[in-house]
Image: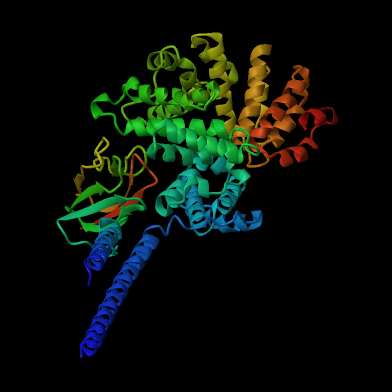
Amino acid sequence: MTVKNKIIVGSAIVVVLCFSVASIIYARGVLRANSGPCHAPTTDSIVHADTVIVTLCADGYHPADLKVKRGVKVTFRTELPHAHWPASNNHPSHTLYPEFDPKQPIPQSDEWSFVFDRAGKWGFHDHIRSPYVGTIEVVE
Amino acid sequence: MIKKLKNLTHRANKNVDMGTKKRNILIAAVLIALVGVFALIDVFAFKRSHEAVRVKVAAPSTLSAQDASAKIAHCHGAAGGAEAEIDCIFGDLKGTLLEGDIATGMSIFDAAYRDFPSFAETGCHKQAHRVGDTVYYNYTIARGIDIKGMSFPQITTACGYGFFHGFLEHYTQDHPTPAVITDTCEYLRSAYGKDMGDIGQTCYHGSGHGLEYAQSEKVAKADFGKARMFVDVPLAQCQALSKANASEKEDCQEGVFNVIVNFMVDNNFGFSYPKDPMGWCKEAAPGNERPCIAEVSQKFDSFSGMDPVKLREIVKSAPNEELSAVAFQTGVAGIIQQRVTKGNGYDETLTQCMKLDNTYFRFCADSIIHGLFEHGEPQVEYKKPLAMCKDPRIAEKGFEKECYNDIISRMPRFYSPEQRIKICAEFPASYQAVCK
């Protein structure tokens, strides 16, 4: 093979490798976007864990409906690029479960946790963007 | 011999050339195949991530009035009273929006207004907001459908453009910059302005709501209840709207204060309704009290016991006559909101207005018409005002011509030119030419 041909072939291999790597990175990014807390499966069963995470995503809370035992700590996070404020229904007074309310916006990078020590079915919403709603059922 | 050797060498070289050539072709084929494979991966990944954006919005369609009523009939008598009925209606409405389109969803809204008195009495503007909220979160956020990919039927002007307020306040809350607001509002104006005469103004007002919501997310808890921390930035952003005229900038600022008044009523963010709302406005927006007073006076209907005569006394505390009139007119429109579904919607209020002096009678009658339009039955808002203009009391006060002109001036807000031609045929003959 002449030197010229070697250069051509070598350059083509480099181009293809770069393209391949870029494609893999991009595809992994897409796959990552389609996995994670905003794609977690939901369940009707009681979640047996000391701490449960509820994430606010573009299409709402994940999980939007949750069943936990009394005394479980639920941590609220957001994947959206702004502050959030999870709180008990009804909006905007939060009177159904007044303690379930951080009383201020939680910055996007922060999370807020609450221990549910009252049994019942507690509807909640994002106080800043109230169409985002969910339910936490607390059982004995 | 030499010749033979030369031939052999030539053949050997030819073979070597052929081998190199084949190898090059093979390498090229492998490279092309690799490129093809990764291109396919890219296309697949791109398609998956952008699937939502490619969803075409269905062409507008509507349910018949009968079908829409049938769809929500089961909500009558829902356990929990009016609130439960309305929640039930919105459950169906959201389902319809998700399966169909905005026009179909608004058919449900229309049926709810007609069939459930509590729907309008609790504030049809507020209900229309909810439809706009639902569309924003379920179309734009969840499916990536931008406002420019949507089709808005004429009925979205219902209840004082509440749908657009609801949609735009959340859209702006998520994109709180004058540049985005200008781009959005000027798009709506150019696309829909012919049929929805106030779409530009509405957009700027709804965006004012959004600017305030966006600002409220950033205020530290220690500053809750401090008006200037909440309003200074959004008011300045309203002033920075490059293509809004002075009136539209003020509409934007009214939108800002509208949200603050809601905070006050709900005891949200440290606010509560002030004992001296006029004084509060002077502190919150010194030198620019008008948009503030236009909004705080929303609540004057309840302070006045739904009586325009008492309302007249309350608004005397405004800094000047002009602002008194603004507050009075807002208060009367608020009274009409609560009476619009009762009989002809204006009778009791007009009787009360008759006790006022001529100047305030005119403000009162004008505001009744305004309230009947803003809270009236979707797409037939004009009927009750038209009936009022024929009321003998209007002629008695010499307000007949002004009354009809009031209606005519409001019609472009809600009706397309084609609709207006048909409506004008219902005016007395002497007003039809002016109407068209």
The percent position of residue B428, horizontal first and vertical second, equals 82, 31
Q: Depth check: A22 or A80 in front?
A: A22
Q: Depth check: B23 or B286 in front?
A: B23
Residue A69 visible somewhere in the drawing: yes
Task: Identify which residue is drawn at 71% across, 36% down.
Answer: B383
Task: Identify which residue is drawn at 84% across, 27% down.
Answer: B430
Considering the image in quadrants, where does the C terminus of chain B appear?
A: top right
Residue B227 vertical position relative to residue A84 in the rendered view, above or below: above
Q: How many numbered dots are placed on residues in this image?
A: 0
Residue projecting furthest to the left? A50
The percent position of residue B37, horizontal first and vertical second, equals 32, 70
Residue B342 visible somewhere in the drawing: no
Task: Identify which residue is drawn at 54% across, 13% down.
Answer: B324
Considering the image in quadrants, where does the N terminus of chain B appear?
A: bottom left
Residue projecting furthest to the top? B320
State the image quarter where residue A65 is shown: bottom left
Residue B7 left/right relative to A129: left
Q: Depth check: B242 or B128 in front?
A: B242
Q: How is the image coloured?
A: rainbow
Residue B22 left/right relative to B240: left
The percent position of residue B326, horizontal first and vertical second, equals 55, 18
Residue B65 vertical position relative to residue B186 in the rendered view, above or below: below
The percent position of residue B404, horizontal first and vertical second, equals 74, 26
